Structures are given as C-alpha cells and as structure tokens.
Image (cartoon, rainbow, N blue to C red):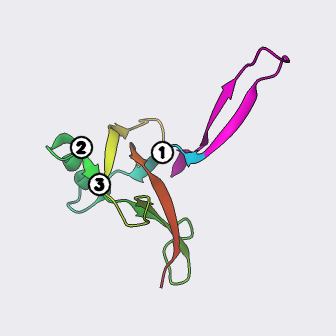
Amino acid sequence: MAPSGGDQLTGEQNTADGSAPVVVGSNKVGARTLEVNCLYTETAGEPWKIVSNRYNGAVKTIFLRYSPAGGGQGAQRFVCARNDDTAVAVPIVNCLPPEVDAGSGDPAMFTFSVITPKLKEETIA
C-alpha cells in the first residue's frame, strides 16, 4: 500500500509591493491516491478476480480498507471515506496485470490504484 496526495490546497499571489508572494492555506485537502500491490492468484474471491472484474465491468469502483498491522483486534485500520467519515466506493484508476519475472522465484504480483476523498483512521474492535 502506497498512499500519496492529501496535500492542503494553497494559493499564492504576488503583489506590487515586495518580492515574495502572499501565500494562504485553504484548510481543504486534495484527494488521496492509494497504490495497492497484491499477490496474484487465479482463485475466485482473491484480489485479482475481484478488482479486475470491477475494473473491466460497468462499475469501476470498490470499497477499500487496509490495516498496516494485519487487521487484528485493537489494530489501526484506514478506510476510504467521504467527508462525513462514512465508507465510500472509490474509483479504480487503473488495474495492471500481474508482473512476472521468469528468472525469480518470487510470486506474481499485480497493482491497482484508487483515488479517495479521505482516509478515515479507526481502531478495529
């Protein structure tokens, strides 16, 4: 999982007086992009089948949440959410086929990306 974005939106304007611009923060943040790397399998119910079917279908969205510590009780979890912190189905920006290196013993991996209004942090009960 590689999150990016979410920067505060800012503005700047030079004036006739001085050489530095006036810079202001908006107290609003941009959307976040999540790049997700998953183990590729051809088993029904596994990530590749779910994500590629959604991406190649008519509805290119998915609900996504992840827990960096593995998802046990008491661990932190991040959920793609609306401004009011409710979970939201987010657009799948891309879904790349598995990358395979024939000279390596590593398992095949695939990558997909989503864009979300925000990430809500919660504790798993």
Question: In the image, is residue 76 above or below residue 48?
Answer: below
Farthest-out residue, left: 58
| Pointer 1 residue | 31
Q: Residue extending furthest front?
A: 16
Q: Which residue is mark 3?
A: 62
Magenta stretch: residue 60 in it? no
Q: Is residue 35 left or right of residue 25?
A: left
Residue 104 image offset from top left, x and y in percent: 48, 40
Q: Quadrant of residue 58?
A: top left
Question: As shown in the figure, which amino acid type bears the numbered disc 2?
Answer: Tyr
- Residue 111 figure quarter: top left
N-terminal of the pair, mark 1 or mark 3, is 1
Name the N-terminal-most of marks 2 and 1: 1
Q: Which residue is mark 2?
A: 55
State the residue at coordinates (49%, 64%).
120
- Residue shown at the point (55%, 83%) measured from the top left: 74
Crowdedness near tag 1: few (<14), some (14–19) or many (≥20) residues, C-alpha within 10 Å:
some
Q: Is residue 51 visible?
A: no
Image: magenta residue range: 1-26
56 vs 116, left or right, is left
